[in-house]
Structure formats: structure tokens, C-alpha cells
Image (cartoon, grey):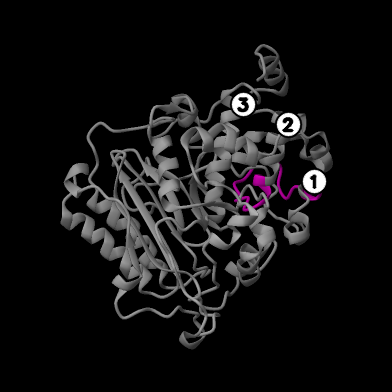
Amino acid sequence: MSSLVQRCQLPKNLATVTQIGEEVAPRDVGLSAAQVEEIWKAVTAFFATGVHPALQICLRRRGRIFLHRALGYARGNAPQDPPDAPKILCTVSTPFTIFSASKAVTAMVVHLLDQHRLIHLDDPVCEYIPEFARHGKEWITIRHVLAHRAGIPTLPPEAMSLDNLEHPEKVVEILCDLKPVWPPGRVVAYHAITGGFVLAEVVRRVTGTDIRTYLTHTIREPLGFRWMNYGVREADVGKVAHNAFTGPPPLPPLSTLLHKAIGSDVRTATEISNDPRFLRAIVPAGNIVTTAEELSRFFQLLLNGGELDGVRIFDRRTVRRATLEQSNWEIDLSFGLPLRYSLGFMLGADYVSLYGPDTRQAFGHLGFTNIVGWADPERQIAGAILNSGKPLLCPEIYYAWNIMRAIAKHCPKETGQSLKPARRSRPEPQSAGQSARRRKSVSRR
């Protein structure tokens, strides 16, 4: 098996492929130099596994960046690249595709519509997309989609064809014709791609513009983000870090589950992600392009309760609602594993957690693969780890989790810091009639 594992070539001295961005002194954020060094050691140990050609990390504490670094090559050092391929160093400014971590951004766009009284989370999707009601989907609400309870987790292969991505109306038609696997609300089953397209079409029907434009006007421009958008302009395609298939050969059952969720195998999905048509398209659940600094800044916005650098984007109650627990260790039938979800985020836990031990109040999202953006209110951490290697599952995943463990261990909790209660029961859904009356009682923007 070891001879079949795809790895990148590593330099003898990692310092030759390391760039350090602006960082405050550890003491300025309540840490010691030794604590930050231990976190960095965990990062370099992960990179040294050779399954990621490039890696970025940006960690904020108390709103200030204390670790902002890049490792490796953005292009030219994938296992499939020829030895003489031009190698382009990864910098702290190199943009990456963050795959499923895009769902956190898409979710907050939808929550912003709710904040502006343009939708209600308990409205049926078909109130905005009437043709979505086919095959019994008239009972699926926006809340169901955000919480992975809509019952439509599987994507037909043709939906993600590169030609269709350039014609989003074709993707919407495919989704409207889907037959639910389960009744809405009954089970949790991760919607890898489907939910994003549904939510984006709701945004388009309500605002009259696509979700990319709406994100730009409401969040990107007010906060001055350079990237943080669905795909990139044609002129920027060549600047995005090139993704590489790495690790061991994908094997069932994981390879089968992934194929059902995204409509293709791992190798094909990786190749598609590098195609200019994918990078120009809008894939709401999977093609936000950004940097670790920007993604951690987005989570700092949420950690602050919706305000950043004097600009308020979200009401504090909107952030609370978005990060409130909706499922507590229910078995996710897409993964076959128990997970905690809110309305758009993957939540932390006391023991076995995506964000390290004792991180119950943490919220964020993973991306394919070993990509993560998150916030931990108790530690006042907002962070992002991006990479370009795409191993499905290999022993090296331990080193990815070890980074999160090191961050949780070496960044102590801040007394009295909390964004939300640890638990709260799910709000009582409103009927469609109640939702309609609410919308009629307020003015639309």
C-alpha cells in the first residue's frame, strides 16, 4: 500500500518553502512564545507527511493575528507533476478553493436575508421556487436545507458537469426534479452539494441577483475582502492554488459514500476543481476561493457577534441563531457518524471534536480535505487552515487533528467568554401561513 500512496516531494529544509506574514507578539494575545511554537510544530509535522503540496494557516486570538504562515508550493509540486515542472511558492496571499467550508459563508448569506425580513427560515423552499415542489418536496423548508434535514443529499452526476456549471438554470432544473430519499426533517444526512444550489436559487429569486453578487454587495465590499467569493474572475484563475490528488487509493465504503454525495470520484472531483470552468462558476456549497487570513477574518466577524472593524453586517441574534445546535450527536446517514450541526455550521464537542478537545462552543466547517475555518468563543480564537492536497483518508489525518488539539491545548479559555448558550431546544417551526403573514407585515428591501 505504501508504494501506492501519492506524496509530494519535500525539501530538506522547510524554511526554504515557508513564508511568515504579519504576526503580533504572543504576549499581546495572552500566550507565550513556547505555546505558539508548539502549535507551529504541529503544523510542520502535518505538512511533513507529504500529502499537501501547499498549506496556509492564520490564527487570531482576541482579534489579533498571532500565527500567519504558508508552506510549500501553490503549483508544480503535486505527485502527478513532472520533475521539471515550474514550481510556484505558496505565500500567505495565495488564494485556495475551500470546498465545503463554503457552506458556512452561504449559510450566513441566507441568515442575512432572514435578518432583513426577506425570507423566514421556516418558509417552504417552494414559496420561492415553485417548481421545487415536485415529487413531494413541497414540505422542505429553508431550515431543513441549512440543517441537512431536507432529505435530498445525493447529487446526480450530470449536475456537476462542467458544462452545466456554466448554466446554473440547468442545475436548478435537475434539483427540482430530484426525488427525496427521506421525508424532510426526519433524519440528518449531509448535503454535500445539493443544499448549496437550493439556497443560492432562493437568494436569486428573492433579491433578483445571483448569490455571488449579493455576497459582494452585503459582505465582501463593506469589509474590504479581496477574495472570499464563489469562484474567481477569468484573470485570477491562474492565481488559485492547484489542487492535487494525494494519499492512498480511495476504497469503499468511503469512496462510495463520497461518489454519491458529490456525483464523482475523488480523482475526478480534484481535476474538476482545477478546471477554469469550475473556478469561474458559482458552486455555493463548494467553490468559495479565499485565503486563510480572509477566512479567519470572516469567523472573527462571527465571533464578534456580527461586527468587524466598526462595520456591522449581522445582528448579534442572527449569529446566535445561525450557530445554535440543531442536532446533537445524531447519526449522519451520509457519513455514518454522529455529528453536531447548527443551521449552517459543524459544532464542536467536549471530547471527540473537530476543533480539538473541550471545544463545545466552537463552530465552523470542514472542507475537502483537512480544510477548516472556525471560531472558538471560549478561547477567543478565529482560525483557518487551508491546503491543496486531496487525500480521502489516510493515517496522516492524525496530524491534521493534532493541529486542532495543539491549538485547543495551548490557547487557554478566557474567563467569561461566550457567544451562545451551550444548548437550547430547537425553535418551534412556524407554519407557511404564519411565515407569509410575517413577510407581508414588513417592508422588503
Label located before the other in sequence (3 or 2): 2
| Amino acid type for the residue under numbered disc 1 | Glu
**Residue 235 painted magenta:** no
- Going by the image, does 34 lie left or right of 57? left
Mark 2 crowdedness (10 Å alpha carbons): few <14, some 14-19, many ≥20: few
Q: Name the residue under label 2.
A: 208
Circle on res. 429: 3
SS state under label 2: loop
Nearest-to-viewer mark from 1 and 3:
1
Image height of 376 relative to 425, above or below: below
**Viewer-nearest residue: 100 or 255:** 100
Q: Distance between the residues labelled 1 and 3?
A: 30 Å
SS state under label 1: helix
Residue 152 at x, y = what percent?
70, 48
Mark 1 crowdedness (10 Å alpha carbons): few <14, some 14-19, many ≥20: few
> Which residue is painted at 71% across and 55% down in the image?
155
Residue 343 at x, y = what percent?
54, 38
- Going by the image, does 195 lie left or right of 167? left
Nearest-to-viewer mark from 3 and 2:
2
| Amino acid type for the residue under numbered disc 2 | Gly
